[in-house]
Structures are given as C-alpha cells and as structure tokens.
C-alpha cells in the first residue's frame, strides 16, 4: 500500500514531543480541533508513536475487520500480560471465560452479588447516619472490588481473608502502573513498556509474588474439588463460581493442575470487573435524578425485598437510561487501540494503513455527536434515553461504550446488572446529595474521564 493513501498527519513543531503536550493538556479539545481540520481519520504523534485516530464515520470498520487486532493493540499499550505472567493473546481466553462462567450463570451470580453487596455496604458505613464521600470513584471501586472478589472466588475461598487482600492489592498496583508517565516513549515506545515493568519490579514485584502466593492458597481448594468430583461422580454438586469455570477450562489438566494459571485468571477477572464499572458507577452516583430513581424503585420493588430478581431489574428503565448516560460520559476519550496486522488495512474512503500501524477510536466523535443523542450532548442528562428504546447494553455505530463487532464486551450485561443492583440498594438505603449545588465537571487526566465531585450520604429513616 502506498504512503500517498495514508491518512493526513497533523502538523507539529517539535519532532520528539510531537502533539504530546496538547494531547495531555486537553485531549478532548485537541482531538476535536484535529477532527474539524482533518476530518474523521488523521494521524498524530503522541508519546513518540504515530497514532491514527478514527472517528464516527469509520470507527465501525475497525471493529469488524480481521486486519486489525484489538489483542495486539492492547498488548502494545500496556504490558499487563508481563506484569501478571499471562499468555500473550490472553484477551480471547478472557472473553471465552466471561461467556461460559459469568453469563451462563447470571441468575446465581445475581443472588450472590446482592448478599455480598449488602454486607460490604454496611461494612463501609457501619453505624454512621451520615458519611461524606470525597471520591465517588474510590467509593464505588472499593465496594465493587470487594463484592466481585467475594463472589468470583467461591464459598471456600471467601473463608480465607488473605486471598481478598492479595486480589485488591494487586489490582491497585496494576491500576497505578497505567499512570506512569510516558516520557521515555519520546525515544522509543518500547522503553516506556520497560519502564513500567521495571517500576513494578523495583517496588517489590507485588503482582508476581502475589500470584505465587494466591496459587498456594487456592491449591487445597482446587485439589478438594477435583477429589470430590472423582469420588462422588454424578452426585457431586459443583459450586457455581469462577473457580469451577477455571478448573474445567480446556487448558487445565486435572491430573497436573497449573495452579498459577488459575490464580492469574482470577486476578485478571477481578481487575477487569472492577475497572470496567467503577468510573461509570461513580458517574451514576453524582447524578441529580435521585428522587425519580427512588420512585421507580418503589414501583419495581414495593416490598423493599433484599434480593431483586433479574425480571425486576429489567423493569428499571429510568435506571438503565441513567447508566447509559453515565457510560456515555465516562471512560477514555481516545480508546480501544488496535494494531494493523501483516496484511495492512484499507478504509472505505480509500485511506490505507501499513502493517504495524496503531489505531485508536475517537469516542467523543460518537458519544458527543448532536445527531446521535437526544438533547445537548455536553450535559449529563440521566433521562436522555428513558423510553427511547435504547438500552445501555445495546451496542451499535452510535454507541460503543462496550466496543463493537468482533470484540464487543461479553460481560456487558453483567456489568450493567451489578451497577443497577448497587444503585438500587444505595437509593433505598440513603439520601445522596452533592456537596455543592451543581455537578462538578468530570476531570480529564491523561485521556481518562474521571468523576470529580463530592457526596454526602444520609441514611434513610425506616
């Protein structure tokens, strides 16, 4: 493919810095200006790397193409596989695990999730009648991480508190590694990867040590389940949890179990579950439609039952609109990196990219487009999708919060469900108010959109 057909390169002054300063200063405004001048496909020089940005009219072509790899793109951006010791193309295995383990048993997980959720919320508040929450993001992340870790580990593992500590500590270290400055990328992008790995290992290589320890802790539980399966035969009632899904995975030889592989994938699932829901869950918390949502809860669950069924959550149409709006305004401005494979890639408008090119999706061009939303796209409106036949889990060219095409998130239904259950419980239990009179604009840092408001929780009177 000829270089003459490649997308336009946005002009820049300084060879090493390129567009990095503008990108970090205000990525949303910078990408919008480039889009206005160059159209929906253009290339920028950021962190020492040429990155092609693809907007609304052509983004779907990336998602459906076999010439662009999300797995290789993700691996290029973050060395998660090396931090945890995962196989290189681990995203496909993770997606398969989510489909077979989570989605096939969603009713069971829903019940467990609510029981553990109520317990963790009460642990968070104790006997307090009023509690100030300075960081909704940290608040949601803490509750969701503890809850998800508990239900994914299984009943036997929940009796070992050390496992929970390992999973939460490792998730924290991985999350922090994403914010290590990209300065070495100016010389070569691979140097940043080495810096991340060096920083993690210099700090004690917590993930690798914790995975070895977690493998030791789950060994007796795994061995006991395999023994019961052999001795009890058809009368063995296998627990419904992630651990069972991993033990029965085709990669596991039950006569010679790879305990570390199981441990690493438990950690991965907890990390993904937490970080995929924390930001938009926090965005939900700092909304302004609380009384309307409470009215809906009173209609859906008038008896205030502790356990809500999936049928009842499906009736929470206003809540679903609220969640979709939070998803629309959360996440990362430039996201869903793909790498062009050996065959190269050509857009429908004639632009082409050579093998090895990196692509990222301009989410704002889709989620903040006037023609794709109902009303002002720049304002948070929890009722935006209410009664519009536009559920939060339905992806398409105009809504890509969960990806699209071959790499659409298989766990999106459970992710939305867990936030619905969290919100439903908090709404029924507390009056939630912003500290100020108006919603504080989300903070954008290094391309991440972060909810940045403070809340006051007041326990409702029975």
Image: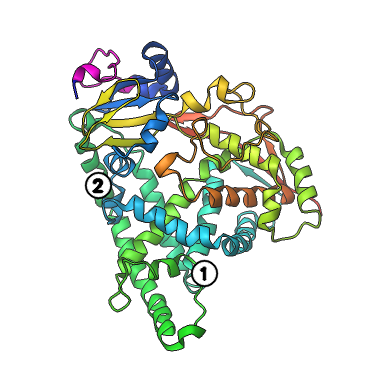
Quarter holding the N terminus is: top left
The residue at the far bottom in this view is 231
Look at the numbered disc 2 and give the secondary structure of its residue.
helix
Q: Position of residue 417 (x, y in %)?
A: 60, 51
Q: Report which residue position mark 1 lands on.
A: 240
* Mark 1 residue crowding within 10 angstroms, few (<14) / some (14–19) / many (20+): some
Quarter holding the C terminus is: bottom right
Vertical placement of 183 versus 414: above or below?
Answer: above
**Residue at image coords 52%, 79%:** 237
Q: Residue 6 lies in magenta, yes or no? A: yes
Q: Is residue 135 visible?
A: no
**Residue at image coords 41%, 50%:** 172
> How far is disc 2 from disc 1 in space, using C-alphas?
35 Å
Vertical placement of 405 versus 227: above or below?
Answer: above
Q: Which mark is residue 173?
A: none
* Mark 2 residue crowding within 10 angstroms, few (<14) / some (14–19) / many (20+): some
Q: Position of residue 27 (x, y in %)?
A: 41, 23
Colour scheme of the rendered structure: rainbow
Q: Is residue 342 left or right of residue 148?
A: left
Q: Is residue 270 visible?
A: yes
Q: Is residue 349 left or right of residue 313?
A: left
Q: Nearer the viewer, mark 2 or mark 1?
A: 1
Q: Residue 131 lies in magenta, yes or no? A: no
Q: Which is nearer the eye, 425 or 409?
A: 409
Q: Which mark is residue 197?
A: 2
Which span is picked out in magenta?
3-21
Vertical placement of 144 versus 436: above or below?
Answer: below
Q: Position of residue 171 (x, y in %)?
A: 41, 52
Magenta: predominant secondary structure element?
A: loop
Look at the numbered disc 1 and give the secondary structure of its residue.
loop
**Residue at image coords 39%, 58%:** 267
């Amino acid at each position: 493919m000829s270089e003459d057909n490649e997308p336009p390169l946005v002009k820049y002054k300084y060879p090493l810095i390129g567009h990095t300063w503008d990108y970090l200063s205000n990525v949303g405004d910078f990408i919008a200006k480039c889009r206005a001048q160059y159209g929906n496909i253009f290339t920028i020089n950021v962190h020492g790397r040429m990155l092609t940005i693809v907007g609304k009219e052509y983004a779907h072509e990336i998602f459906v193409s076999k010439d662009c790899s999300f797995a290789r793109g993700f691996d290029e951006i973050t060395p998660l596989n090396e931090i945890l010791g995962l196989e290189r193309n681990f995203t496909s295995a993770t997606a398969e695990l989510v489909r077979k383990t989570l989605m096939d048993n969603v009713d069971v997980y829903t019940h467990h999730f609510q029981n553990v959720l109520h317990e963790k919320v009460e642990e968070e508040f104790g006997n307090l009648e009023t509690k100030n929450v300075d960081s909704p993001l940290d608040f949601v992340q803490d509750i969701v991480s503890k809850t998800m870790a508990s239900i994914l580990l299984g009943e036997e593992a929940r009796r070992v508190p050390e496992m929970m500590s390992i999973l939460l500590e490792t998730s924290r270290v991985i999350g922090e590694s994403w914010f290590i400055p990209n300065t070495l990328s100016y010389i070569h992008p691979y140097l940043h990867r080495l810096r991340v790995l060096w920083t993690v290992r210099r700090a004690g290589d917590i993930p690798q040590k914790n995975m070895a320890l977690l493998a030791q802790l789950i060994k007796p539980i795994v061995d006991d389940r395999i023994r019961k399966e052999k001795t009890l035969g058809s009368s063995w009632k296998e627990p419904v949890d992630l651990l069972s899904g991993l033990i029965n995975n085709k990669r596991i030889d039950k006569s010679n179990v790879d305990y570390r592989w199981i441990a690493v994938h438990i950690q991965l699932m907890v990390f993904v579950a937490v970080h995929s829901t924390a930001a938009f869950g926090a965005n939900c918390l700092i909304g302004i439609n609380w009384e309307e949502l409470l009215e809906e809860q009173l209609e859906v669950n008038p008896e205030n039952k502790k356990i809500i069924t999936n049928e009842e959550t499906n009736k929470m149409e206003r809540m679903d609109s609220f969640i979709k709006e939070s998803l629309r305004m959360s996440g990362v401005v430039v996201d869903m990196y793909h790498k062009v494979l050996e065959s190269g890639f050509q857009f429908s408008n004639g632009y082409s990219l050579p093998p090895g090119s990196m692509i990222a999706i301009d989410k704002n061009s889709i989620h903040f487009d006037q023609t794709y939303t109902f009303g002002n796209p720049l304002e948070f409106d929890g009722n935006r999708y209410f009664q519009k036949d536009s559920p939060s889990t339905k992806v398409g060219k105009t809504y890509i919060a969960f990806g699209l095409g071959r790499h659409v998130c298989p766990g999106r239904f459970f992710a939305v469900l867990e936030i619905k259950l969290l919100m439903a419980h908090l709404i029924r239990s507390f009056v939630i108010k912003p500290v100020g009179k108006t919603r504080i604009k989300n903070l954008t840092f290094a391309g991440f959109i972060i909810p940045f408001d403070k809340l006051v929780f007041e326990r409702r009177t029975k």
